[in-house]
Image (tube, grey):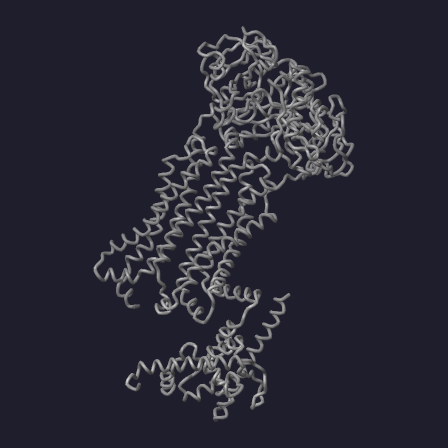
Amino acid sequence: MAEKRERYQNRIELLQGTLDMLILQTLQWGPQHGYGISVAIRNRSGELLQVDTGSLYPALHRLEKQKWIAAAWKISENNQRAKYYRLTATGKKQLTRERSKWSQLSDAIAGVLYPEER
Amino acid sequence: MSWLSGLFRRRKQETELEEEVRSHLEMAAQDRAERGEDHREAARAARREFGNVSLVKEVTRDVWSWGSVERLTQDLRFGLRMLAKSPGFAAVAILTLALGIGANTALFSVVNGVLLNSLPYPEPDRLVTLDESKSNFDSGSISFPNFRDWCRDNRTFSMMGVSRSYSYNLTGKGDAEQVRAEFVSSDFLTLLGVKPVIGRLFADGEDEIGASPIVLISEGLWNRKFGGAPDIVGQGLTLDGRTFTIVGVVPASLKLQIVSFRASDVYAPVGQWTNPLLPIRAAGLGFHGIGRLKPGVTIQQARADMKRVTADLTSAYPDADTGIGATLMPLKEQMVGYLRPILLVLLAAVGFVLLIACVNVANLLVARSTGRAREFAVRAALGAGRLRIVRQLLTESLILALAGGFLGLLFAAWGTKAALRHLPSALPRAVEVGLDARVLVFTMTVALLCGILFGLTPALRISRPNLQETLKEGGRGSGGARHRAQGIFVVAEMAMALVLLIAAGLMIRSLSALWGVDPGFDSHNVLSFGVALAPSPKDANTDSVRAKLRQLQSTLAATPGVQAASLSWGAVPLSVDDEDLFYLEGQPKPSSENDMSWALSYVVQEDYLKVMGIPLQRGRFLTAQDNERSPHVIVVDDVFARKFFGNQDPIGKRVILNSKGGVAEIVGVVGHVKQWGLDSDEKQSLRAQLYFPFMQLPEAAMQPSSWSGTGVLVRFEGDPQAVTTAIRSSLRNMSSDQVMYEVQTMEEVIADTLAERRFSMIVLGVFAALALGLASMGIYGVISYLVGQRTREIGIRIALGAKRGDVLRMVFSEGMKMTVIGVGVGVIISLGLTHLMANLLFGVKATDPLTFAVVAIVLTVVALVACYVPARRAMRVDPIVALRYE
């Protein structure tokens, strides 16, 4: 129980809009299903970012509707049928836009937080 | 069809989402299992980690684009779920609406059945009523010879008919019985489109005087007396001792009831009436007509045509027809036109009730939406558009409205039936009132409009929330604007309730004023009825007729419970009247009847004054000695005396009566009787009254053939029912063929003349009570809600030392403010509206200050009582409890 609460407290709530970017980024490395995406984000963030399924699936369906990602049913490595999402061409462009926006934002925040490093 | 393919796509999307989630759970469980967890434990943990499956699905589905039908079913399902969550709210809202919509539907079904629906006859727009217009009377009766000439000379009618009500004594078929009858001309039933059940209607010429006696009977009588025998045509029927041959059966579907005609048991051709005056051109005799216009002829053309016809008759018969014209009215207008103002007033009133109901529900919705502010803020944050939220809220209010409408329809169906059962005499065409397609469409439309009306305000308000405010505040909601809206709601409700209460109050005042009017006679303990006499023997003469009538009177007077009795002809106040032409002795004999004077003529016996309790002012009343062998005398009323003799003493003066045998001396003066009704008698031109001794009726009127029956008035003591039974048995002892009919107390006669007003008073009263109840519910709800919202503030005030009384005063003043403004607005609206009902009022002005004041006070008091409960709750607020929740 103690471990669980600690993990919960350490979790960082995703800023609005960043989940979309993280999903697109994850799909940069190849098609993946919803579960795979959530595992990937968790692992790459050092267990810090835990993606809520209640946010993940609406986001996936929204991105699909916006045609930034496309879905297809495939058989997974474990021989299971799963819905795989892949990045589309417009999705790649969107990812580039979001990344540059994000680096601007983090630079700006860093500038405020650590002015002496400038 | 696009929604259908949309539906399939949706189903596919749905199963895919299902599978996507399942594969997620399986993979998560498999990963855990590979890490060494127990299989079953792994599956459970995966599910736990995933969270609420159905919620995830729901929010994911929200992302999909929706087709209109799916969106609607989705909204409906969601709306129903939300309402099911707060059944109390839903029940109150639906019931409130059901009352409002039900009252509207009920009244509309009456308006629809009476005013809007066309009459149930073929091509009803071509039907008009026909009357003879006389010098100062528009709707006089048509003499039979004139009618014949109208038929022959007109060019605009395809058919014309006249009718006159009568009562026949039916014997030889079981117990003797008085049956309703109508004398009709040959075309009368044909022009109404009546199709006989069996046999035929009357043919041309069969209505001539002296034609062989034939008769049509009603389907009801056919079943009752003949068991519906198929060989009825050709059988005989004994009426007033004569045998008539039945030629056909009139269907029960004929329900026409107008001034001159009522669907009856027996229809006889006009010529069968044994009245010796029938062939006299100047004799009115109570015939009125209806006509069917030729196709394409307007009523104006017909009026012009009839003007020509009557003008020709005037030149041909100057004695009888000078000043005689024809009055034409559309049949429907004549039947129900006079009801239009009343029904429109009631429709407006019931519209107010519905508005109040809507405002109440809007109020409830606003109060409830505060509790849901957070729900909608969350939905908006998740990306739901404003339109989406408005649509969701509107769906909910439409569900409420339709449920209310459906329940209201049930209320209306039941309520209309109950109301019409209790108030049948007030409404013509009452049998035609019911729920039909137009009423259903009306109810649906009203319900939908209501749903939009009361749903839109809260929906627009809630969909424009300040997201961050609401989320931060934890759903407590913010309020100035919302409170203002509720304040306006309450003010509107109070104002509308006040208008209705004032309308009802004015009607009550009118009716009580009418009840207070002295009709000129004592209506208590007086019974009016008819007696159908046994058929006279062959050798009967005028003496035996008089003897029989005398015997009848003495038998009645000797009946236990009867204090006094008088036979009467045209002498039932407010109900049955007859008129006479006369001129004063000493004046030159007028050249024609048109130059004579009219008076209401009561043919009565010596005890009439005692029966009716009419005061004798001068001289004496008629006595038993004023009989066929003594000189003619009359008694007049004070209106007659003043009108024709001014300040002179009328006693000893003589008048010449046109139809009742010449000179008669005035022997007494009695008080005036309000023959034309409690309210309108004063406005009539023909008010002078004279009393004529029954036994002095001319020999021609005492022929055995003229006397099938007579009117009777008795003063009784004790129970009217018991007296009726006693009279019935003493009549039967006299002759088994004698029948008592149309028994009414004079109080009932008076009540009947007020039926229409009483109907509108009761209906307005019910609406006003409904409005008062709804409005006080409204103010109670709003004040309660405001107190709930301000619990914290009140707690702080009390903690800071405010007295409980101050709190009570604060809450009261809030309610008071709304009430006073509402009452003020209501008074202004009422001042503008009540004059619309001016002609329904009697003895009270449309702006009667007393009614206005009393109603305003009553409404204020009720509103304050409604505020009292929440105000006490506010007073009892425990500051510690109120503040702990901070």
Q: Residue B712: x and y, percent?
A: 57, 23
Can residue A69 be seen?
A: yes
In the picture, residue B875 is in which quadrant? Answer: bottom left
Q: Looking at the image, which is closer to me, B594 or B478? A: B478
In the picture, residue B577 is in which quadrant? Answer: top right
Q: Residue B405: x and y, percent?
A: 53, 53
Q: Looking at the image, which is closer to me, B783 or B836? A: B836
Can residue B177 be seen?
A: no
B231 relative position to B631: left or right: right
Q: Looking at the image, which is closer to me, B79 or B85? A: B79
Residue at 64 percent across and 19 percent down: it is B283
Q: Residue B615: x and y, percent?
A: 45, 19
> Does residue B723 lie above or below B769 as drawn?
above
Q: What residue occupies the far front of the structure in this picture?
A: A118
Q: Residue B63: x and y, percent?
A: 51, 72
> Does residue B402 lie above or below B858 as drawn?
below
Q: How many marks?
A: 0
> Does residue B28 lie above or below B56 as drawn?
below
Quarter holding the C terminus of chain B is: bottom left
> Does residue B214 lie above or below B598 as drawn?
below
B112 relative position to B762: left or right: right
